[in-house]
Amino acid sequence: MVKGLKDDNRSRNYLIIAENFYIEGQLEKALVFYKKSLGFINDDIEEKIDLLFNIALINDELENKDEALKIYNEIIAYKPKYAGAYYGKAIVYDELGNKDKALENYFKAVEYDPEYDRAYFYIANIYDEIEEKNKAIEYYKKVVRIKADDYIAFNNMAAIYEELKEYDMALEMVNESISIHSGYFRSLFNKGVILKGLNRREEAIEYYDKSIEVDPNYPFSYLNKSVIYIERKDYKNAIKTLSVGIKNNPETGFLYYNRACSYAKLGEKEMAKKDLEKAIELNPLFKERSKMDLDLENIL
């Protein structure tokens, strides 16, 4: 057998071993064999880049961020306009909290691949995080232009429009999200928030209930639903809602705190005291907050 064919076989064998280890979740062993496979690659640059990409991804998963960046830069040295490598770098910088570097590399990715919808998605995400809401909307719109069924992008736009109190646009976006995927609990939750903003409280309760049905472990659905009852002074239904929330989320302090306030409003001091103590146990910050809460002054 000639040397080139022998090397190709070795590279392929090591690659198979690496992929099996990766599937089994043994990332460090997978990394060893991807590197062994790389060592027997001859002149096939594309094959080398594919292997380097896998090595970079695993280093990222193993929290070897500097090594991942180094490998992505090595890929770029081979292929300077490879959008995926810039996207990989951006993800690492994003995870490190370096938003400026992340944006720089996401923008490089879309420069070399204008249809790179995930890069636009995370550009929008960063703009949302740094409170540049209009820019965030601009880039989410680029996402849905490329990927019209991206229900998460539509939902995220809805949430931003709701923050801006542009409720009609928020409702349009969240309805689009739900029409694409009716089982995404965040869209159902956000529709509840938007409907409450539009003073359509009964419909808001209906969508909080739908969100709870899909994901009973999201405590804010119970919180927001209970707030509607509290605003109506319907403390019994607020307590009922919060009690279901606590059953499904027993380590969530703010559910106990709000139930304590509701019990206090009904004059059930012992129940209120018990819930307040549990809220403080789960989150000591509630101790200071309770001192300024008029609902709890008789309990304290």
Image: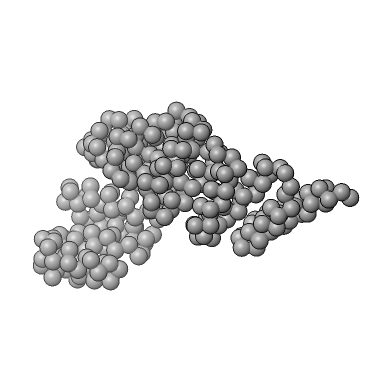
Figure quadrant of residue 265: bottom left
Quadrant containing the C terminus is bottom left
Q: Is residue 274 above or below residue 180?
A: below
Residue in view at x 38 percent, y 59 percent: 248
Q: In the visual, does 6 lie left or right of 190?
A: right
Quarter of the figure with residue 172: top left
Q: Can you see residue 252?
A: yes
Which residue appears at 37% of the width and 60% of the height? 249
Horizontally, residue 20 falls left or right of residue 263, namely right
Residue 181 in view of the camera: no
- Expressed as whole percent of the image width and height from the top left, the position of residue 231 reads 17, 48
Colour scheme employed for the rendering of this structure: one colour
Quick check: 13 above or below 142?
A: below
Question: Does 78 sit left or right of 13 as displayed?
Answer: left
Comparing 213 with 11, the one in front is 11
Residue 24 percent location from the top left of the image: 65, 59
- Left or right: 22 in relation to 260: right
Q: Looking at the picture, does residue 133 appear above or below residue 36?
A: above
Give the percent coordinates (x, y) of residue 144: 44, 31
Instruction: List the single residue furthest toward the top.
Output: 145
Q: At x 70% / y 58%, what residue is drawn?
A: 36
* Outermost residue toward the right in this view: 1
Q: Residue furthest front?
A: 77
Q: What residue is shown at x 23% (from left), y 59% (from top)? A: 258
Front residue of 104 and 129: 104
Count every numbered label the image shows and give the total: 0
* 128 vs 268, nearest the viewer: 128
